[in-house]
Image (cartoon, rainbow, N blue to C red):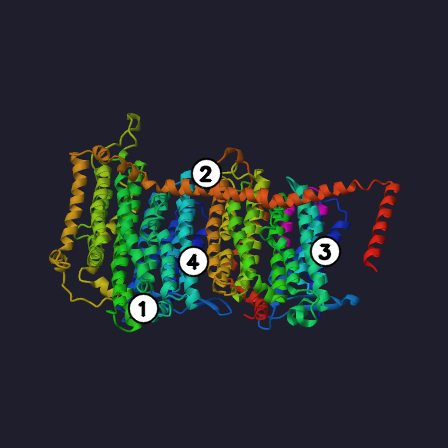
Amino acid sequence: MDFNWLSTILFLPAAGAIVIALIKGKDEKLYKWLAAVFTAIPLALAIYLFVAFDRTAGGIQFEESYLWISPLNSYYHLGVDGLSLPLMLLTTFLGFLAVLISWKVTSRPREFFAWLLLLETSIIGVFVSLDLLLFFIMWEIEVIPMYFLISVWGSGRKGYSATKYVIYTLLGSAFMLAGILSLYFTTGSLSMVDIANGGLGMVQAAMPAAAIFWLLFIGFAVKLPMFPLHTWLPDAHTDAPTAVSVMLAGVLIKMGGYGMIRLCVSMFPSQAQEYAQILIILALIGIIYGAAVTLMQKDIKRMIAYSSISHMGYVLLGIFALGEVSLTGASLQMFSHGIVTGLLFAMAGLIIHNVEVRDLTKLGGLAKQIPIIMVVFVIAGLASLGLPTTSGFAAEFLVFLGSYTSNVVAHLNVYTIIAIIGVVLTAGYILWMLQQAFHGPVKKEFNKVKDADGLERFYMFALVAVIMLVGIYPAVLTDVFKVGIEPIVKLIGG
Amino acid sequence: MIPYQLVWAIMLLPLGAFIVNGLILRLFVNRKSPVYGYVTIGAIGLAAVFSVWALISVATNSEHLIAVPDVNWISIGTFNFHIGIMMDQLSALMVVVVSVVSLMVQIYSLGYMHHDEAGYYRYYTFMSLFTFSMLGLVLADNLLFTFVFWEMVGLCSYLLIGFWFHKPSAANAAKKAFIVTRLGDFGFLAGILILYFNTHTFDIAQLHSLAVAGVLGGSALTWACIGLFGGAIGKSAQFPLHVWLPDAMEGPTPVSALIHSATMVCAGVFLVARTMPMFVFSPEAIRIVAIIGGFTAIFAATMGLVANDIKRVLAYSTISQIGYMMLGLGAAGWAIAAEINSGALMGSGEEIIIIAKAAVAVGMFHLFTHAFFKSLLFMAAGSVNHATGTFDMRQMGGLRKTMPWTYVTFLIGSLSLAGIWPLAGFWSKDEILATAFTSQPVLFWLAMITVFLTAFYMFRAIFMTFHGEYKGGDPAADKKYAHTHESPWVMVAPLVFLALLAIGVGWWNVTGGFSSFMGHEAEAGHGFMAVFNIFTHTVNGVPLPLISLLIALFGIFAAYVIYIKKWITAKSIGKFFGPVYDVVRDKYYFDELYENVIVKIGLMKGLFTGFKLFDEKGVDGAVNGTAAVVVRGGKAIRQAQTGQLQLYGIFIGIGLVIITVCVLIWGM
């Protein structure tokens, strides 16, 4: 408590953004190096906290709490538990790599890196805030850098996609704000910890709990995204610059899953149980339907984007199976999807940058021309289809195991079996994608395509290492996640 | 007694070779260097030595078990998972099969892959990974660990089938193999979940005890077993998921010899054998195993009759022989299941587990002998390809003179496969036929017909390849390929070694040695003369061994008549059977059905296109529609904002009037 670890991690990227915005250097390299430094330090600190986190004590650690707006009873309250700590670590990790991935951005680099760093601060803020007002502010700040990053540095229908993203997100946040206000007027508190522990009975209810549950849920469901609120995602992903796709798929949509666990499940355990059935069915639709639509895509980034919808269905399934194993699996799936899809987008971005083709039917035979990119792409693809020894398998298996053995909903085991069909479809589109891009006869027009350079290899291998580490020894994360999940499961009464 | 650390070493040595080859050596050594091969061969050679040592230890140890401490892997709440090794008779047998065949294949590959443009690096790296995964698969002491390696061998299979990925046919075959087997893995995974849900364990030994104790039973056990068998169907290319294996022949031939004949495709048989004490408590599930096995045996054999590609003949033969193994397991298990049901089988739980585990001897013995003679046949076919550059038997002929070693070893393998006394295949096939004969007459007759078909298609292959007109010579003189010559000794030596095994390994069970190793009570020894006494041996009064031998000889004779003497031509037979011949040649249209009808038309052009349109027009259309309505609505309302004060004044006036009226009416 001597040192404000979380505040430092939270505001360093934002400070970096301000420095980059104010300094005017002649050399573009300066901005990149500044961005790298201002994201590397938070990563190092986050790793330190991850190691220093007391796994036996559990609870909320590295807490900071200062009265912020006294009439509202609002605090500047930060802290991490077993659930949010790995997600914060993931954000700082991908935040740092996103800077490296953007190393070749040439158009208006100063603004680009400033926005990118501000984006990182806002996402970290969502994961470490324990005050609902602070949480909401961080949630909203994220939209601003996203709008500019997509609409200025994007490609294709970037204006349309950026606007769609902003409006869709704001619609979700409108519901969420209404939910947070209702929560505040019902309980008189903005503390996420107090509300979860005290339950809604603290003050007499001004509004039915179910209504608040749904208001909050819709806000998170848009972000996750849950079928049928998902159509902003393929557009935003496809048209965003690579680093932004990485952040978007890697951590931004995890805010939705995190919010569901932290607010919807922890604060409304009985409502969560009541509506689990419908939400699990929507999760199944997301998994199967998402995978089926993915199979129909031709654009490499759009394909990965659609696969996210399917993969986030597993998260939703794991969350609303409401068991300890399933929730841990869902959390692990969020982390795993973050690094795996982050890597897939980074590799797709590299192919689009180096080959200048993004239509899978026009690619082909690249295995011989860009072998390193191929190997990494294949590993990422195998992790995405849930091959054992990659993080994808550990996460999906825990979700399946947890939901199959949960009895929150009748016939949940049958639903789980249906969800496993998604695994077969995933194999279908991943292998098709690999074949289209890399197999087949060598094409002469790609002879001069460059393979990954040193910097690119660095971030590729870093992500591969984490994927394999989590896949071979998932306890490195699950031991932390379960510390955060345990008290939540107790609230559910499981 | 082998120390348990060395049991771990059996599987970790090839892993070491994978890491050294894949990550370290490449930094210093050119990808075409044979050093990669030496590393792999060294590691697997050592693993083979330890495997044999382990087998001997298990055989001589009174408990038939080597205890190996396990390692904690992950624990969440009540879910605890350990990594451990189960070294009993079954796994001891399998590690020997895997490591010995793998060693031979790796040595052979030094010659076969010598001229390959891709070099040794990728090849030996994948081969090491495969051997590690396959050893892990057979050593695992719990089903989750089995499943992990099950998927790993599938990955290696994918990578090695697609080794020459620049060929679209190879890339397609690799993808097909992975997806079709994954369809089966869906069942495996579901089976594991069902078992865990009912027992809270993945541990195989515990599952056995719980099944015997009746804790695990009823429909849950049946569905779990069917799920596991679903995985086996996919991996072992049984009907109806057999379609991937013939295409998998696109991979390098040593890969086919190792993965697609001797080891990985037999993993399904191993899985059923491993969980046999569960299957015997589910008569429905074990019946399915026997029926699918018996049907696949004859079904695949018919397709082997008409294939012209020598590797595809062997591939169909593999599917058919694995069907035999399944039939052997199923028939033996079925008999025990019937005894349990009728209450005839009495005994403690421990005893029943031992009886059930011993029942797998029938199927496993055939797996054991088959691994040697089938990998031999594949490698000999590879040797032919090495010389001629083709797999099409119609372009071969008369090769016995230029390739005598290949010819003799191929002949030995074929005789063994056909079940000719006293070679290995005769003994193992005889066991299956005898078991089927006593319990399942219909399946027995299918198996008997298959004996004929097997002998026929193997000798058809021999006569087309090694006999008849020699077609090599100067390409300028319109010959298909240059003069053929025998392959180098690195390829021939493994052939000779495996040929010796194909002759001799069957004698292990002549006096019931193998059965007693697997747990049957030892029968009285007959000494060496038992090799000859087999023909006086009868089952229910019928001299089965003699009959099956005669049928096999008749199959060879039929091939001789058609392909050497040409008393009847193959063409006229084809004509005689007409449409039947076409159906068999077109593989009963299963590829057509799966790839075109179901996947292309049903899913991609049908359902999934529907989903895509729904997503674009329906879901996203609603989003854009809402936006459009809002924009249009805004435009419409904007008309009211004229900026004319007079108009605003009128609106204010009207509003005031309405308010006044309302207050007057309701306000009082």
The answer to whether tags 2 and 3 share a subunit is yes
Q: Are marks 2 and 3 in contact (CB under 8 Å)?
A: no
Q: Are marks 4 and 3 on the same chain?
A: no
**Which of the image's four quarters has the N terminus of chain B?**
bottom left
| Distance CA(mark 4)–CA(mark 3) | 46 Å
What secondary structure is the stretch in magenta mostly built from? helix
Q: Amino acid at mark 1?
A: Leu
In the rendered image, which residue does mark 2 sit on?
A440
Numbered range of the magenta stretch? A92-112
Identify the image quadrant of residue B665.
bottom right
Mark 2: amino acid: Gly
Please rate how many residues cluster around mark 4, counting C-alpha atoms within 10 Å: few if below 14, some from 14 to 19, many from 20: many
**Label 1 and label 4 in one chain:** yes
Instruction: Give the CA distance from mark 1 to mark 4.
Output: 28 Å
Q: Is residue A349 left or right of residue B107?
A: right
- Foreground residue, B630 or B563? B630
Does the residue at mark 2 contact the one at mark 1 (Cβ under 8 Å)?
no
Q: Which residue is mark 3?
A: A14
Tell us which disc is closer to us: 1 or 4: 4
